[in-house]
Amino acid sequence: MPSFRSDIVDIAYEVSGEGPPVLLIHGFASNARVNWIDTGWVKSLNEVGYQTITFDNRGHGESGKLYDPAGYPAPEMAEDARRLVDHLGLPKVRVMGYSMGARIAAFLTLNHPERVIAAVLSGLAENMIRGVGGAEPIARALEAPSADSVTDPSARTFRVFAEQTKGDLKALAACMRASRQKITLAELGQIHVPVLVVAGEMDEIAGKVDPLVAAIPGARGVTLARRNHMNAVGDRQHKEVVISFLNSIN
């Protein structure tokens, strides 16, 4: 993957296909390949005429690693996304984020509305407002000697996933301690681009779709039946509703 310098860190990215650009922002402990390529998102979007821009968030994948939590506030991670759009010479993009990526996409949309045509916030809904607890147990699990030594079931799931994606555990622990920043209702009320909120019916990390939809003027929402945080990502209906939404935006 090519890379560019975003402030203090190198960001690895990839551009695929032709057409209106869609910036895809992956979730915590994942990477561009796992979140967007392996799940078929890049292929599906390219096939219907969209160019995809994927990148590894700071601390993830092939991008640079920082080991101080001060390097991972969600608004600063959103600046990496904005700088990538600048680097590619694009005036505006459609943006989609999953889980942590949805939070980053929301901050990008809030802080740089002139650069965002439309936003898809997926895999993080009501809990973008209420907050997602358990950051410190997850961080400690990532720093533990092994996954077998982690007793908290939820934290152990994150550790196992991070190992599967070959993540840098120390960098991910730093990211976990700083990136789960809540967005206020007042801030969400300032978003005036078209927004689609999507989450699985059984996704406890995301929370319910409706409260986030209600907080963003004109937002639309879709709940994926019988889907949780992990299997909602590549769900066929997920792709269908997102593509339909993107096609509806002029």
Image (tube, rainbow, N blue to C red):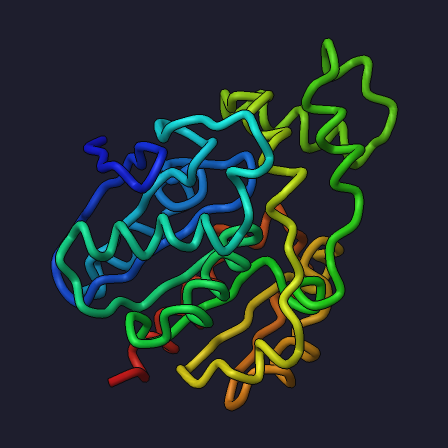
Residue at 76% from the left image edge and 25% from the top image edge: 140
Residue at 39% from the left image edge and 46% from the top image edge: 36
Q: Position of residue 137 (x, y in %)?
A: 80, 33
Q: Against 54, is 146 above or below?
A: above
**Which residue reaches farthest top?**
145
Q: Position of residue 147 (x, y in %)?
A: 73, 17
The one nearer the camera, 35 or 74, is: 74
Q: Against 9, is 51 above or below?
A: below
Q: Position of residue 77 (x, y in %)?
A: 45, 48
The one nearer the camera, 109 or 25, is: 109
Q: Position of residue 170 (x, y in %)?
A: 59, 21
| Quarter of the image where one finds residue 171 | top right
Q: Quadrant of the C terminus?
A: bottom left
Residue at 49% from the left image edge and 52% from the top image edge: 101
Residue at 22% from the left image edge and 37% from the top image edge: 4
Q: Against 39, is 190 above or below?
A: below
**Is residue 13 among what the camera can see?**
yes
**Is residue 237 among what the camera can see?**
no
The one nearer the camera, 158 or 65, is: 65
Judged left or right of residue 50, residue 39 is right
